[in-house]
Amino acid sequence: MGDRILTNGKTEEEMPDYREIGPSGQQKAYVVLTEEERAKGFVRPVRQSYRHVGKRPKYPLRDLTDDEKKRYAEYNYVKFEIYPESESPKVGKYWTEAELNSGCGTVTTMRHALSETYARSPSFYNATFCSYCGEHFAVGEGGEFVWEGTDERVGT
């Protein structure tokens, strides 16, 4: 959607190494929609802060059966997420303790051009940065972030 530019005002062609990760864990620059494209209006509210909540089950969890504990012991699964029949043929997902406790809970605030790009085109990015973890993690329906003060996943 629309024209793109880097957060430093250069084009991707002018700065082909913009994706290089610096000591902070962030890229040298990030792609955003141009000011003209963002001025066309937003389809979501402009939000600048998001919380790293990690991976979270969408559906109810149940304890593992004794048989499942034995069968999958090497994977360290602790819970099973039961998918509804509408998700068929998938029946569910096994979760580890680490997955269930992922996400540091830190709130990260981004620059205005980035937040307006999300507001104009919510699925523009496939990952975003956690200021505490110093890494990029997935966004979207199965992503690891929610907009601060909401349960809405970043990138949806």
Image (cartoon, rainbow, N blue to C red):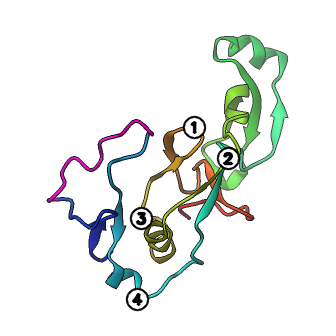
Proximity of marks 1 and 2: CB atoms separated by less than 8 Å: yes
Eyeballing the image, is 133 above or below 124? above
Give amino acid for label 1. Cys
Give amino acid for label 2. Thr
Task: Tell me the distance, in whole angstroms, between the alpha carbons under discs 1 and 3.
Answer: 22 Å
Question: How far from the left and from the top, in percent, is residue 90?
Answer: 61, 42
Question: How far from the left and from the top, in percent, is residue 118?
Answer: 49, 69
Proximity of marks 1 and 3: CB atoms separated by less than 8 Å: no
Mark sitting on residue 124:
3
- In the rendered structure, which segment of residues is drawn in magenta? 13-24
Task: Tell me the distance, in whole angstroms, between the alpha carbons under discs 2 and 3.
Answer: 23 Å
Q: Which residue is mark 2?
A: 106
Task: Tell me the distance, in whole angstroms, between the alpha carbons under discs 2 and 4.
Answer: 32 Å
Question: How far from the left and from the top, in percent, is residue 64?
Answer: 81, 25
77 or 82: nearer the eye?
Answer: 77
Side (left or right) of 116 relative to 6: right
The label nearer to you, 2 versus 4, is: 2
For label 1, the SS is: loop
